[in-house]
Image (spheres, helix red, strand yellow):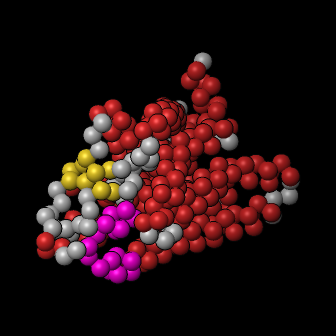
C-alpha cells in the first residue's frame, strides 16, 4: 500500500496475549495475581529499606531503587491487560502508545544499569573492604543512581522520535499486549534500516557494556573470594552475591530473548511469552529472590512483624 493513500493513525488496537475468549478470564486472573504479588513484594522491600536503619547501606539503597523500578515497570506494561478485560475496550491513543513504549523501554535500560551499579558495589565491598565507606559513600551512591536512571531515558529518545514522527502505519492493530518497539516496527511503513542500526548500537551499550562490566566485576570478586582462607568466609562472601547473580541472569536471558530474536510477524506470538516474563515475572521474582536469599532482609522483616 501507498502510505499517502492512508489516513494517519490516531489510535491503536491492542490484541492482547490471546484472542481466544475462553482464555481471557484465566489470563486476567494470572496477570492480576502476578501484579499483586509483585507490588506487595517490592513495596515490602522498599518499606524495609527505608524504615530499618540496619539496611541503610549502599547495597540496599540500590535494591530500593530496583524495587521502585520494578513496581513502575510492571504497572506501565501490563495495566492494559487488566483494563481491557474490565472495560472490554482494546484501544489506546497514539500519544498513550508512544508514552508507554518510551517509558517501558527506558525502564528496561534502567534495570540493567542499576544491576551494574550493584555489581560495582559488591566488587568494592569484597575487593576493597577497607576503602568501601569512602568509595561508596552517600554522595557516590546518589550520583550512580542518578546516572543509571538518566541513561535509560536518554537512550530511548531516538526511538520515541522515530515512531512519533511516523504519520502512517500499515495497520493500527498491535499484535502484543502493550506498545513495544518490536510490534511497532513490524507495522511501520518507513524503512527500518536506521532503526535496526541504532538498535544494534544501543544493544551493544545496553547489553554488552553492562554485561562486560558485571562479568569483570565478578571475575575480580571470585579471585578475591578464593584468597579467603576459611571455608566459612568464602561461603559468606559467595552468599552475599548469590541474589544479585540470580537476578542479573534472569534479566539478561529474558531481555536478550525478547529483543534480539527475529522481529518477523511469525515470531511475535512467541515473543509475547518472553515479553510477559520480562514485564511481569521478573519484577515479581526480584523481591522473592532477595528476601529468600538475604539474611539481612529476612531479619528486618521479622523485626517489623514483631
Residue 185 image offset from top left, x and y in percent: 34, 68
Q: Is residue 22 left or right of residue 184?
A: right
Q: Is residue 226 left or right of residue 72?
A: right
Residue at the image point whose x is 67% and y is 65% from the top = 218
Main secondary structure found in the magenta portion = helix
Residue at the image point whose x is 86% and y is 58% from the top = 229
Residue at the image point whose x is 48% and y is 38% from the top = 23
Residue 164 image offset from top left, x and y in percent: 21, 65
In the rendered image, is residue 144 in sight?
no
User: Residue 213 sits in which quadrant?
Assistant: bottom right
In the rendered image, is residue 212 in sight?
yes
Question: Where is the C terminus found, in terms of image quarters?
Answer: top right
Say above or below: 172 vs 158: above
Which residues lie in the magenta part? 181-197
Give the farthest residue toward the right: 230
Residue at the image point whose x is 57% and y is 43% from the top = 285
User: Residue 265 sits in which quadrant?
Assistant: bottom left
Question: Is 196 colored magenta in this rendering?
Answer: yes
Question: Where is the N terminus found, in terms of image quarters?
Answer: bottom left
Residue 293 image offset from top left, x and y in percent: 68, 42
Say above or below: 133 vs 44: below
Front in this rendered view, residue 17 or 59: 17
Question: Is 44 colored magenta in this rendering?
Answer: no
Residue 251 image offset from top left, x and y in percent: 55, 57
Front in this rendered view, residue 236 or 193: 193
Number of numbered discs: 0
Q: Is residue 273 left or right of residue 221?
A: left
Amino acid at each position: 500500500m501507498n502510505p499517502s493513500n492512508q489516513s494517519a493513525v490516531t489510535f491503536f488496537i491492542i490484541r492482547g496475549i490471546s484472542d481466544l475468549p475462553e482464555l481471557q478470564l484465566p489470563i486476567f486472573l494470572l496477570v492480576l495475581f502476578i501484579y499483586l504479588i509483585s507490588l506487595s513484594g517490592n513495596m515490602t522491600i522498599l518499606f524495609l529499606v527505608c524504615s530499618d536503619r540496619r539496611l541503610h547501606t549502599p547495597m540496599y539503597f540500590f535494591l530500593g531503587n530496583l524495587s521502585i523500578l520494578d513496581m513502575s515497570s510492571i504497572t506501565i506494561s501490563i495495566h492494559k491487560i487488566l483494563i481491557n478485560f474490565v472495560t472490554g475496550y482494546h484501544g489506546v491513543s497514539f500519544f498513550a502508545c508512544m508514552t508507554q513504549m518510551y517509558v517501558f523501554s527506558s525502564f528496561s535500560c534502567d534495570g540493567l544499569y542499576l544491576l551494574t551499579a550493584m555489581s560495582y558495589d559488591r566488587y568494592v565491598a569484597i575487593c576493597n573492604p577497607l576503602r568501601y565507606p569512602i568509595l561508596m559513600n552517600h554522595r557516590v551512591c546518589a550520583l550512580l543512581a542518578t546516572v543509571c536512571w538518566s541513561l535509560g531515558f536518554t537512550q530511548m529518545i531516538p526511538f520515541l522520535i522515530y515512531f512519533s514522527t511516523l504519520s502512517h502505519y500499515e495497520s493500527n492493530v498491535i499484535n502484543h499486549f502493550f506498545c513495544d518497539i518490536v510490534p511497532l516496527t513490524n507495522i511501520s511503513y518507513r524503512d527500518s534500516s536506521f532503526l535496526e542500526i541504532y538498535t544494534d548500537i544501543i544493544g551493544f551499550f545496553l547489553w554488552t557494556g553492562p554485561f562486560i562490566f558485571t562479568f569483570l566485576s565478578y571475575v575480580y570478586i571470585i579471585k578475591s573470594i578464593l584468597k579467603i582462607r576459611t571455608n566459612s568466609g568464602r561461603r559468606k562472601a559467595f552468599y552475599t552475591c548469590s541474589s544479585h547473580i540470580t537476578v542479573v541472569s534472569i534479566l539478561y536471558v529474558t531481555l536478550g530473548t525478547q529483543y534480539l530474536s527475529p522481529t518477523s510477524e511469525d515470531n511475535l506470538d512467541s515473543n509475547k511469552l518472553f515479553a510477559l516474563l520480562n514485564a511481569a515475572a521478573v519484577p515479581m521474582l526480584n523481591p522473592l529472590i532477595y528476601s529468600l536469599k538475604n539474611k539481612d532482609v529476612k531479619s528486618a522483616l521479622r523485626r517489623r512483624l514483631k
